[in-house]
């Protein structure tokens, strides 16, 4: 007993004892020109998000290939090739964090391109901030990522609030033209994720700023993978909404839209956020089931008639044989902006590249034509979305903003009786 | 193993692991992963107190992990208390939360209890995701990077967590409580006749288990520096603890520790090369263990041991 | 008032799907005292089988039901003979069966992932969005058809269990396997048949689900969890109880919007589960043995 007490005592002492700490590696200004620039990255290449992860990978890899085609990035007169070190994080937060830690501290990558899906980006970006390495991502849209005062994190996705805002701007135009009632009754239905929250905020901010034109009559969130939306739809019906503004991911969109259609509902304007144009949706609901649905995305290949856009779409088609979607475009732009900042800095010094990213304004394929990471938005890009509408002829033209529109939107939904 | 031998081995292992990173040339990545694994070992051990010693399989331990993590995170965000105090308070909150649902449901046995824990886990996840004032809702909570231990330092805190969990595991198994627990596992009513109060004993164990898992949640919050309810409270997290305990040897004193090692090795090394197969691999492992060696790795080692030293004692 | 009626009809239709979802789990638990954690995986697998039949051979999901029943009966028999048979009976076996069948679920998920990737799949029938008018409201024809199938399944099961020799044997085994052995019933064969039937019913649920929802390899988890709620409400192991449990859950979820935010309606079911288990472990309707 005596001896065991001693051991327990020793253990307790050890427990209260201090913990070794380590000086962080002294990353003093590294101005030497290396043989290659190594970019670390993780993406969900397997698991539930594998489809999207694979698309971002295409975007990242195309950007690297284009950059290396003429020898690489110009660092003070010497062309240095770029090497992408990409690992699979399986959409797991802990894994994304650990892999980023490994790439940064063990493999000593120079810079980092972020992963996809908001929660994972949010977890991973803290590693970049802790280790003070420039982190550019095309897959994290939530404003909360950029509201923490991080200095090293840059996001290419404009906030989802802009999605709602751009859609509302088009709606406002229709209202001004007399096509929609004033005030219009607005129902907001959003999935309880940061995507849905930002969407809701976008609608709320717009309606608050135009309070004479809009009245929010329903505002409800729902849980992912719902089996029955009749109660929510009934609330919307009861509130006699004119505009039904929903934010949902694909499975819920399909379930909800099927119930919306079969319960013979018809609102003057209907949107599911980014959803509605994809081929999966047409398969699930039939061409008629998606008619007149409004949707908005960060980028669309219909923007690609000229200049940088044409260049991107052509190169993408040449390499992969398919048309790019917004995922690939955002991955491509995220990587390209990093390369541009490195070239501007003329060095692989992390602090100098960070400063260049922060001050960056470059010509871009994104709506608005310019990409920058404004400091007042915490390093998140800020540009309008492209609004599309599914028309009965099977096309989904861009209907807003006017400078890129290639079709004319329809409101109110002509399929509604009365 | 006698008590003295156990404590000697324990102190030696703890000391060896304490100095290992200072003398061995392991990389930062491995160092961090090992630190995180210590925490998982501690959590799996804590699950085993209820699932193994008492035989009450909980599918809802993620609820305590999440409560501990979020309470600790809130305390770290809103007060100047040191993180270790925050972890402890988070753990206590988780233990109390465990009692709140555990006291009524622990009267249920076998599958009834397991099903109830599934309900508890899912309801807690949904409410936590909805309650954005406390958990940040679906956007989660970010911890300040300053004032938190670095991942490098967390290795030792993880080790202390593990050390504490191992001592409690050993103490529980060897104490009077441990005897009472195995009596409850065999037959609740008979245990009652023997003067064991099943309600009290089970409550104590669940409180201990919940507190330890809650402290682990706090550790995880410090490690990740960002937590969100969908991840913290996920069903997969509860499942992970069960897998570790079962692979290592459910109900054995140290089994979950070995189970956690296998679990992490599968995740880290096999996943990197055959990431499409990892779910099936866990599944196949589970099936094989249940059919052929219900005590998992521990059972396997014992069997090999018996083979190597055929007749020594008749136990 | 009108809205309440519309919601009530929606809840009844939803209850049909919920009941179909839980029959298999309830039957296997009632007779074998085994919680089939692979239930969700079977539902998912059957959704994929139905999708393949629809996609490759243009077989309508509702016409595919007989095929699915046969295929999954065989799979169930296979799982029983290959794995479940070896488990010890009694409390130890109950815990081990949870873990074993969970392993089976993980394997099924992985196989589905390897074969069909993680992408969402849907079945679009010509009538996916057509509607029928009932009591002044407009309802999905597919949901109505699902409800009809679930009701037919309920009556068939009930007749099978109460009017046939096999059914009586199943109920006898559920109540007391030992005395059945004495009475000359081959208990093991009853177990094989019941596990097969329970799996086939899970297959039926998967086919029905595939007509309503998009699915991927992780589909089935929430179906499994809700099935638990339903069989607990219904008293663990009574077929009629399951139907009533499904009704209670569906009504609770649909009408909970009047009391709690829609986001939390799912949580209502889980809270009900725990409360009923604690206060009335025999289920809301007080039945404990298979009827």
Image (tube, grey):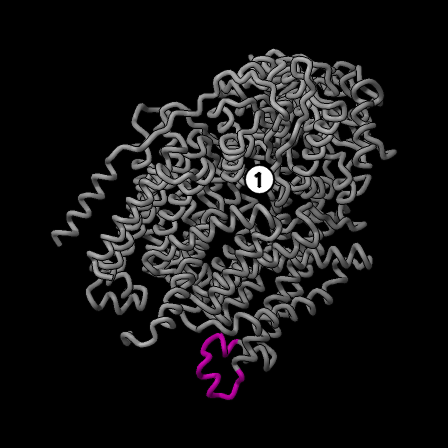
Q: Can the viewer see residue A342 in this picture?
A: yes
Number of numbered markers: 1
Q: In the image shown, does B158 or A119 lie closer to the viewer?
A: B158
Q: In the image shown, does B229 or A392 lie closer to the viewer?
A: B229
**Vertical side of B171 occupied by A370: above or below:** above
Is residue B157 in the magenta section?
no
Q: Which residue is drawn at 78% across and 25% down?
A: A312
**Vertical side of A400 occupied by C197: above or below:** below
Magenta segment main secondary structure: helix
Residue A346: name its quadrant. top right
Residue furthest to the right in view is: A393
Residue furthest to the left in view is: A2
Q: Which quadrant holds the C terminus of chain B?
A: bottom left
Q: In the rendering, at what x and y percent does residue C169 appear? A: 54, 80
Q: Residues within 10 Å of mark 1 (few under 14, many from 20)?
A: many
In the figure, is residue A306 to the left or right of B18? right
- Residue underneath mark 1: A89
Q: In the rendering, at what x and y percent does residue C14 appear? A: 62, 51
Q: In the rendering, at what x and y percent does residue C124 appear? A: 77, 49
Local secondary structure at mark 1 = loop
Q: In the image shown, does C220 or A214 lie closer to the viewer?
A: C220
Parent chain of label 1: A
Q: Residue at x 64, y 35 (%)?
A: A248
Q: Residue at x 48, y 57 (%)?
A: C233
**Vertical side of C54 occupied by A196: above or below:** above
Q: What stretch is highlighted in magenta?
A: C171-186
Q: Residue at x 48, y 61 (%)?
A: C99
């Amino acid at each position: 007993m005596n001896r065991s007490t001693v051991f327990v005592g020793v253990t307790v002492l050890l427990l209260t004892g201090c913990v070794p700490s380590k000086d962080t590696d002294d990353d003093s200004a590294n101005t030497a020109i290396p043989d290659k620039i190594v970019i670390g990255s993780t993406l969900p290449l397997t698991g539930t998000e594998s489809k999207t992860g694979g698309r971002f990978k295409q975007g990242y890899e195309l950007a690297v290939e284009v950059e290396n085609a003429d020898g690489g990035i110009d660092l003070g007169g010497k062309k240095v090739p770029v090497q992408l070190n990409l690992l699979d994080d399986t959409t797991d937060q802990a894994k994304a964090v650990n892999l980023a830690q490994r790439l940064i501290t063990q493999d000593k990558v120079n810079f980092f391109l972020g992963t996809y899906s908001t929660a994972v980006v949010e977890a991973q970006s803290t590693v970049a901030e802790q280790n003070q390495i420039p982190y550019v991502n095309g897959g994290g849209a939530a404003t909360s990522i950029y509201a923490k005062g991080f200095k090293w994190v840059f996001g290419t996705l404009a906030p989802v609030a802009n999605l709602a805002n751009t859609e509302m701007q088009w709606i406002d135009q229709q209202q001004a033209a007399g096509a929609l009632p004033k005030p219009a009754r607005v129902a907001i239905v959003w999935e309880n994720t940061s995507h849905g929250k930002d969407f809701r905020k976008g609608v709320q901010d717009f309606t608050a700023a135009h309070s004479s034109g809009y009245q929010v009559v329903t505002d409800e969130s729902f849980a992912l993978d719902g089996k029955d939306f009749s109660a929510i739809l009934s609330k919307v019906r009861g509130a006699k909404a004119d505009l039904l503004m929903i934010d949902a991911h694909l499975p819920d969109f399909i379930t909800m839209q099927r119930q919306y259609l079969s319960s013979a509902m018809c609102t003057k304007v209907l949107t599911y956020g980014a959803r509605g144009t994809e081929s999966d949706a047409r398969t699930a609901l039939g061409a008629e089931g998606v008619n007149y649905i409004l949707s908005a995305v960060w980028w669309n290949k219909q923007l690609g008639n000229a200049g940088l856009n044409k260049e991107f779409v052509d190169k993408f088609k040449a390499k992969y044989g398919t048309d790019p979607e917004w995922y690939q475009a955002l991955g491509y732009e995220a990587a390209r902006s990093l390369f541009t900042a490195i070239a501007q800095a003329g060095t692989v010094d992390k602090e100098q590249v960070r400063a260049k990213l922060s001050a960056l304004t470059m010509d871009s394929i994104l709506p608005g034509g310019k990409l920058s990471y404004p400091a007042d938005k915490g390093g998140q890009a800020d540009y309008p979305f492209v609004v599309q509408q599914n028309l009965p002829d099977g096309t989904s033209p861009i209907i807003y903003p006017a400078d890129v529109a290639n079709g004319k939107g329809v409101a109110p939904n002509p399929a509604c009786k009365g | 193993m006698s008590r003295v031998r156990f404590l000697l081995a324990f102190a030696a292992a703890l000391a060896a692991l304490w100095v290992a990173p200072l003398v061995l040339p392991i990389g930062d990545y491995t160092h961090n992963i090992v630190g995180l694994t210590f925490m998982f070992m501690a959590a799996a051990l804590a699950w085993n107190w209820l699932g193994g010693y008492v035989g009450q399989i909980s599918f809802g331990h993620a609820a305590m992990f999440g409560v501990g993590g979020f309470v600790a995170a809130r305390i770290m965000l809103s007060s100047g208390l040191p993180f270790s105090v925050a972890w402890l308070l988070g753990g206590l909150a988780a233990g109390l939360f465990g009692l709140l649902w555990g006291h009524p449901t622990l009267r249920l046995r076998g599958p009834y209890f397991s099903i109830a824990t599934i309900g508890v886990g899912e309801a807690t996840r949904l409410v936590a995701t909805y309650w954005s004032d406390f958990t940040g809702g679906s956007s989660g909570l970010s911890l300040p990077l300053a004032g938190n231990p670095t991942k490098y330092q967390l290795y030792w805190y993880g080790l202390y967590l593990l050390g504490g969990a191992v001592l409690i595991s050993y103490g529980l198994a060897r104490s009077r409580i441990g005897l009472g627990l195995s009596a409850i596992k065999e037959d609740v009513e008979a245990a009652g006749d023997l003067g064991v109060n099943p309600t009290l004993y089970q409550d104590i164990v669940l409180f201990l288990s919940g507190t330890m898992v809650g402290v682990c949640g706090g550790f995880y919050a410090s490690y990740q520096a960002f937590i969100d309810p969908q991840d913290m409270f996920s069903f997969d997290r509860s499942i992970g603890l069960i897998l570790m305990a079962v692979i290592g040897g459910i109900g054995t004193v140290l089994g979950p520790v070995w189970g956690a090692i296998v679990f992490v090795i599968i995740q880290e090394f096999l996943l990197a090369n055959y990431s499409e197969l990892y779910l099936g691999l866990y599944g196949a492992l589970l099936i094989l263990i249940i059919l052929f060696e219900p005590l998992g790795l521990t059972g396997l080692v014992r069997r090999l041991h018996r083979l190597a030293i055929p007749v020594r004692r008749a136990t | 008032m009108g809205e309440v009626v519309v919601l009530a009809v929606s809840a009844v239709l939803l209850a049909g799907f919920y009941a179909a979802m839980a029959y298999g789990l309830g039957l296997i638990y009632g007779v074998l005292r085994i919680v089939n954690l692979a239930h969700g995986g079977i539902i998912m697998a059957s959704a994929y089988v139905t999708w393949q039949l629809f996609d490759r051979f243009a077989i309508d999901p509702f016409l595919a039901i007989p095929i699915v029943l046969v295929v999954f009966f065989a799979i169930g028999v296979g799982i029983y003979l290959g794995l479940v048979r070896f488990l010890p009976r009694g409390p130890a076996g109950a815990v081990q069966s949870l873990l074993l069948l969970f392993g089976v679920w993980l394997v099924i998920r992985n196989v589905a992932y390897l074969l069909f990737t993680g992408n969402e799949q849907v079945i679009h029938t010509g009538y996916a969005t057509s509607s029928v008018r009932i009591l002044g409201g407009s309802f999905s024809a597919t949901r109505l058809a699902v409800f009809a199938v679930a009701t037919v399944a309920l009556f068939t099961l009930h007749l099978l269990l109460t009017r046939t020799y096999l059914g009586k044997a199943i109920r006898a085994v559920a109540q007391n396997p030992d005395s059945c052995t004495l009475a000359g019933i081959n208990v093991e064969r009853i177990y094989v048949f019941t596990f097969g039937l329970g799996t086939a019913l899970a297959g039926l649920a998967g086919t029905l689900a595939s007509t309503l929802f998009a699915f991927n390899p992780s589909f089935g988890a929430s179906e499994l969890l809700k099935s638990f709620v339903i069989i607990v409400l219904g008293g663990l192991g009574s077929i009629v109880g399951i139907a009533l449990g499904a009704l209670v859950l569906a009504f609770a979820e649909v009408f909970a919007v009047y009391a709690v935010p829609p986001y939390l309606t799912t949580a209502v079911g889980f809270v009900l589960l725990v409360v009923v288990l604690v206060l009335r472990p025999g289920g809301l309707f007080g039945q404990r043995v298979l009827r």
